Image (cartoon, rainbow, N blue to C red):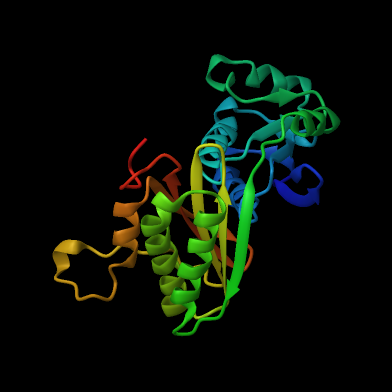
């Protein structure tokens, strides 16, 4: 039976339920489905493993890499819940010991409730028009001032402006700008309606002003990336809260 995948929202984040027999041929598709769970920046991703059968432990590395990437952005925990005895035995191997495993979904939910991270967010929907970048800068400036991060205004507004401009130019859809303040980082994310991956232009290719937006983002941000989402994608970038003049300061 091929792996099927269901997602449901709940008070602690997102509950993902893969079912069926997981083979190496299913790993890429499962990873794509897991990545889409991060688009709304949930508080946590709980993965119900109760209906998953695994023959090769190597296939479980999909949860290892997904957990590492979710920690990078949007900085949320991934909890594996309710595995069968066989799968739990595989997850006890040294390679998987960093993955939090809980006996049931209820136990995972309780852990999230008692260890919930405080995050502040500010979001704005933007039309694909000429004034979208300016509006993005205004919203970002407001967020930085509200959260007492005036030293990040320059880098954050540049990133927000470039991400929104890129979405307006290449996706031509409504974009959602979301700023999130975590314990260590300020994250700027833009979701649009195009599934096409973002492309960083080669600075050695003799570019004009156009096409350099993501290059500027990559230089200004501590880290950046993108993920597929239902009906499009999310492009994100993060800055250290302590950065004084560069997004790459720690």
Residue depicted at x 48% and y 62%: 141
Identify the residue at horizontal 67%, vertical 36% (top origin): 117
In this rendering, is residue 46 above or below 236?
above
Seen in the picture, residue 32 relative to 78 is either above or below; the reply is: below
Query: Which is more toward the observer, 233 or 53?
Result: 233
Residue in front for this viewpoint, 22 or 206: 206
Quarter of the image where the N terminus is located: top right
**Residue 85, percent from left and from top:** 77, 20
Q: Position of residue 221 (x, y in %)?
A: 37, 50
Image quadrant holding the C terminus, namely top left
Percent across and percent down for residue 25 are: 56, 44
Between 202 and 241, the one lying in front of the other is 241
Q: Quadrant of residue 57?
A: top right
Q: Quadrant of residue 12?
A: top right
Report the residue that reaches farthest toward the bottom. 129
Answer whether residue 144 is visible to the viewer in this image: yes
19 lies left or right of 202: right
Residue at left offset 19%, top offset 76%: 208
Whether residue 201 sits left or right of residue 56 in the image: it is left
In the rendered picture of this protein, how many numbered marks are placed on residues?
Answer: 0
Q: Residue at x 76, y 27 (%)?
A: 83
- Residue 128 image offset from top left, x and y in percent: 51, 81
Residue 27, compared with residue 95, is above or below; it is below
User: Residue 126's quadrant in the figure?
Assistant: bottom right
Q: Nearer the viewer, residue 86 or 230?
A: 230
- Say if residue 171 shows up in the picture: no
């Amino acid at each position: 039976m091929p792996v099927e995948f269901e997602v449901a929202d709940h008070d602690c984040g997102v509950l993902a339920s893969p079912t069926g027999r997981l083979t190496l041929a299913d790993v890429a598709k499962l990873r794509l489905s897991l990545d889409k769970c991060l688009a709304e920046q949930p508080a946590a991703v709980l993965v119900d493993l109760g209906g998953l059968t695994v023959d090769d432990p190597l296939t479980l590395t999909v949860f290892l890499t997904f957990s590492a990437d979710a920690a990078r952005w949007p900085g949320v925990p991934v909890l594996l819940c309710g595995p069968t005895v066989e799968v739990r035995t595989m997850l006890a191997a040294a390679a998987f010991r960093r993955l939090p495993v809980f006996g049931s979904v209820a136990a995972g939910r309780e852990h999230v409730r008692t260890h919930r991270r405080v995050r502040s967010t500010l979001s704005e929907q933007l039309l694909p028009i000429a004034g979208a970048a300016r509006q993005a800068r205004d919203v970002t400036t407001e967020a930085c001032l509200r959260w007492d991060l005036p030293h990040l205004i320059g880098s954050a507004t540049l990133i927000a402006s470039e991400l929104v401009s890129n979405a307006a130019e290449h996706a031509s859809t409504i974009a959602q700008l979301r700023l999130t303040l975590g314990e260590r980082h300020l994250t700027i994310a833009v979701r649009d309606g195009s599934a096409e991956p973002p492309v960083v232009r080669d600075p050695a290719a003799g570019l004009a002003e156009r096409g350099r937006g993501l290059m500027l983002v990559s230089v200004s941000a501590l880290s950046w990336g993108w993920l597929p989402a239902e009906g499009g994608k999310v492009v994100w970038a993060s800055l250290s809260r302590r950065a004084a003049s560069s997004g790459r300061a720690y």
